[in-house]
Image (cartoon, rainbow, N blue to C red):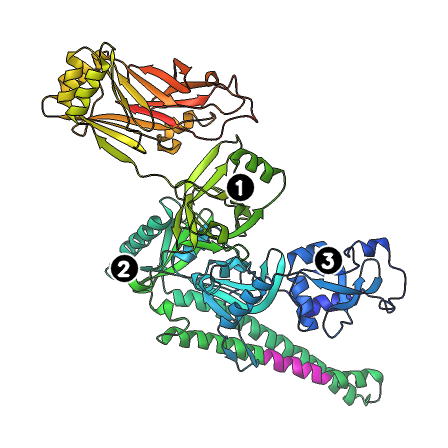
Amino acid sequence: MRKMRAKVLSYVLVVLMIMSLIPVSAFAGGEAMSDEFKAILNEKGEFEMYSVVPKSEDDVMKFFWDSEKMWNEYPDLWFDEFSDDYKSCVITNSQTDESHRVNIKYIYDESAMALVDGIVKKIPEGEYNEEYDYYESYLFEVKDMELVNYWLNNGDSCDLISYSGEFKELLGYKNFRIDGRKGDDAPFYTMVEGFAPFSYDGTVYDVVNIGAEAKHAIFVPDETGDTPEELQAAVLKRIEEYIGKGKVKIVDYGTNPLDIMLEGYDASIESAQEDVAREQGYLAEHEGFIADCEASGDTTSEDYQSLIEQLPDREESVQQAQENLESAQNAKQKYIDEYNTVGGENYYLNEAVGDYYFTMAVGEAEYSFVVIKDSKRMITPEYKSSDVRTGITVDSTDSSIPLDTLISVDELTSGKTYEDIMTVLNIDNCKSFDINLFSATLDKYITKLENGEFKVSIPITTEFKDKDLIVYYVDDNKEIHEFEVTVVGNEATFATDHFSIYTLAEGTKTKENIKITVSEETVNEAIKNAGNKDTVVIPLDDKAENVTSVELPVTSLKKVADVKKEIQIETSVAVVTFDVKALEKIVKDAGANASITLNVDKIKKDKLNTKQQESIKDKTVEVVISAELLCNDKLIKEFGGGKVEVKVPFTPPKGTDGKDYKVLYVADDGKIEEIPTQFKDNCIIMELEHFSEYVIVKDVATQSGTNAFFGQRAVLRTTL
């Protein structure tokens, strides 16, 4: 098999290299410790090692060199002369030739260690290699659309295992970073294996001999046709359903994928044959020198003796080259056997429909694959990652997320950022988490999704058990965004499209919206109570809670219109008053035997359309209300020149005044128009001639920054 990329870590070579730098007197340990050496120790004079306690010296070296945190910070250190419990040793700084015996403090999390121990026990054992007397790495598979996700993100073979759903399921989706060490990348096969560290938060918990493989096969439905065009169309349909259109192209196809794979083996065989011929030539030349000496009677000189002593090495080199050739020939034959055996490791190429293979272009990169008809083996992966320490889990069906992406979570309990958030929220029973997602393949954080969303699940601890919960996000403008929480089992879940700091808190359970029907008797009584006043008031029952919908018969409204009075309808959210002209228009258009329904409810800012949201993104939105007037469920839009007054109860926060706020009319296309308002009796009052989306915002001219209001907020939507 042709090797395209390889990354190999050889501990033996590293050991020999560093040992060559250590002077004979390196471990004397009796000299005074320099300030430079003291700098690598903690206040107690201990060396802090971010790993579990090793069981052998080999473990120490693997844990050290497989820890980016340790290796990057201390590349010049060497460890020797360990105590029996591995909690002290002689540390040498190869740059300064200074050595001292010190105690080691191992830094790790007990629960994470137990978790890794359980995972490692579940990893299957690889196949036994009789030729070399060892167990090969068990290879987890990267299959179907998992492979497409890997290609889409230009995956390095060392990250391949992190794209395997099979492996991540075994991990319980925990955020252990696994890094492979060596790999092969052939036309229809990618593989990585070797010593892979289980690391979390910079600490190495184990180094395990495992790997992953990707057989370049994409599966299509059983009913797919057999022509190249039908196969290509089926593959593109599946890929585009998964990742969207225009991200990949199929640029070519051919036949006989087995022949292409065997080219790699033939190249290895040819190279091995050249090695045999070269070593045989060296041996023949060596034997010729010996024969010349013997022919001349020179059998006692040092040159002759040296030639005789070197002869076994030359013969061994020939034998080794011949064994390598035999191994290359056997490898090729084994590959062919596995290709021809049902269920064999390479049988997937034998399953290629029509013996076709295809070439996919992802940007400038190209990848070869075969197509196999098998509906049962089609996989559409979903993203999931769970934090070891907090148990917080993120999952998503959005295919733009690289499958190697890992969650990282820091629980905030102090610091300026935390204090700022607590000041804005002004709540007690809460927990704040800084949640991030990082892809090693892309070497960047995944902060926001363009179209999809993340589902975040937070384990419910004792203080939140059986409580009504809510999640808050405070943005850079100190505006509060609320996220609805659903309790599933023992987890609080919410949805978001981006990551930052989220605060889980005890909230007030939203009351069920209530609709009341006003009888003719009630309206008649209200007309009587109005007496000589201009307004007939339909009051809200003091015992009623969260009334958001009021229904009245048109016959009752006609009685109000006939006496030339306006009508005021109260809800739990706002007070709406229709003047005589508007009321007469409503009654005229409604007809007999109709009913009129006024709906008024608080809504979230994200209920506005995209253009509207974009137009107010830099404004501090305060109160959100949706109002509409219906006649027999049909929307009423025209009022014949009449007007409607809307009063929104509003208590300005400390340090502000009602005059600090204004109302904006935001059209569907995002255009903004300021509406005249007044503030009276703790209500923002506006008189409207037409109804659409209206937004109550903090006036930029009076906004004081740190004293901005972040409590109740609403968009006034009056569609009447």
Disc nearest the viewer among 3 and 1: 1
Where does the image place residue 235, in percent across and percent down from the top left?
32, 54
Q: Name the amino acid, label 3.
A: Pro
Count of marks placed on residues: 3
Quarter occupied by the C terminus: top left
Disc nearest the viewer among 1 and 2: 1
Does residue 407 lie above or below 272 as drawn? above
Name the chief secondary structure element in magenta.
helix
SS for tag 3? loop
Does residue 286 lie above or below 85 as drawn? below
Residue placed under numbered mark 3 in the picture: 75
Where does the image place residue 459, in percent across and percent down from the top left?
47, 54
The magenta-colored residue range is 311-322
Where does the image place residue 22, in percent across and percent down from the top left?
82, 66
Residue placed under numbered mark 2 in the picture: 221
Residue placed under numbered mark 1 in the picture: 428
Horizontal side, residue 223 vs residue 389: left or right: left
Badge 1 crowding class, 10 Å Cα cut-off, few under 14, some 14 to 19, many 20 or more, is few
